[in-house]
Image: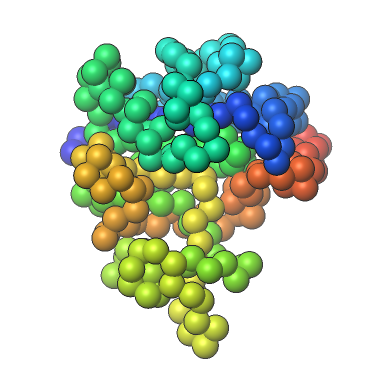
């Protein structure tokens, strides 16, 4: 593949219960969602940065920041039980029907504001040069998470070899990694057939930076993010 055509998708539901209004909450002087829009800006392989939301305020903020917001997400995909894969498949189907086929779908969660352009480019490079196998953003497991991965022949594998949640073996000297939520890149074919962002052969985008790996879910997480943003402004 010479240069993949990639759709960047930022899913941003309006009904956050743990941290109401988080996607448009100001962080370092700009709405949280805009951090991810800015990180994807002007990357040649990204054909569009599409925001899927059910919320008119999020849609307005995202469009003002230069994202593509062609519609509001159907209510069935905006509930507490709606799955990310269904949101991605909905956006992918509409985009390919309207704007033509893509080689990859890049999921950028708005709750990872410090994910850098450099990391996005590294992930796209892995995807392009790895035969378009799925690429997953991971970090070293420092919190004893239950679902972990190890590296085997350059790919991510579960310790239980089931891609679904092997428990951490504290006696193993091999490094273990956890999904950090910052980067998911798959082909449309894989997403449709497997309904997953992970496959039998999943390439790791290893992110060592604790800031980049931060995934905002609670007010505590947001307070940590504010401290990082204030520090970086100095």
Query: Compared with residue 38, is residue 208 higher up or lower down, i.e. above or below?
Result: below
Give the number of marks.
0
Query: Compared with residue 128, is residue 94 higher up or lower down, i.e. above or below?
Result: above
Residue 152: percent from the left, percent from the top? 33, 71
Quadrant assignment, res 90: top left
Query: Compared with residue 133, is residue 39 higher up or lower down, i.e. above or below?
Result: above
Q: Residue at x 54, y 83 (%)?
A: 170
Q: Residue furthest left?
A: 1
Residue 230 in view: yes
The residue closer to the viewer here, 1 or 213, is: 213
Quadrant into which the N terminus falls: top left
Q: Residue furthest bottom?
A: 171
Q: Residue at x 68, y 37 (%)?
A: 17
The residue closer to the viewer here, 147 or 183, is: 147
User: Image check: 11 left or right of 7?
Assistant: right
Quadrant assignment, res 23: top right
Q: Residue at x 41, y 51 (%)?
A: 136
The residue closer to the viewer here, 86 or 223, is: 86
Q: Residue at x 46, y 44 (%)?
A: 183
User: Image check: 155 left or right of 145?
Assistant: left
Residue 125 in view: no
Residue 140: percent from the left, percent from the top? 54, 65
């Amino acid at each position: 593949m010479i240069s993949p055509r990639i759709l960047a998708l930022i899913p941003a539901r309006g009904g956050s219960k743990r941290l109401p209004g988080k996607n448009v909450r100001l962080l370092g002087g700009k709405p949280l969602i805009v951090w991810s829009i800015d990180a994807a800006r002007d990357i040649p392989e990204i054909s569009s940065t599409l925001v899927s939301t059910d919320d008119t305020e999020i849609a307005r903020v995202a469009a003002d920041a230069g994202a593509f917001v062609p519609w509001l997400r159907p209510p069935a995909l905006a509930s507490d039980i709606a799955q990310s894969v269904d949101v991605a498949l909905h956006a992918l189907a509409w985009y390919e029907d309207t704007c033509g086929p893509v080689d990859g779908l890049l999921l950028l969660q708005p709750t990872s504001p410090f994910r850098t352009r450099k990391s996005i480019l590294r992930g796209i490079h892995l995807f392009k040069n790895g035969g378009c196998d799925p690429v997953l953003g991971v970090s070293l497991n420092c919190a004893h998470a239950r679902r972990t991965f190890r590296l085997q022949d350059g790919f991510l594998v579960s310790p239980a070899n089931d891609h679904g949640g092997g428990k951490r073996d504290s006696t193993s000297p091999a490094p273990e990694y956890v999904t950090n939520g910052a980067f998911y890149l798959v082909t449309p074919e894989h997403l449709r057939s497997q309904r997953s962002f992970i496959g039998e052969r999943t390439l790791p985008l290893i992110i060592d930076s604790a800031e980049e790996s931060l995934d905002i879910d609670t007010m505590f997480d947001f307070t940590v993010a504010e401290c990082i943003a204030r520090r970086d402004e100095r």
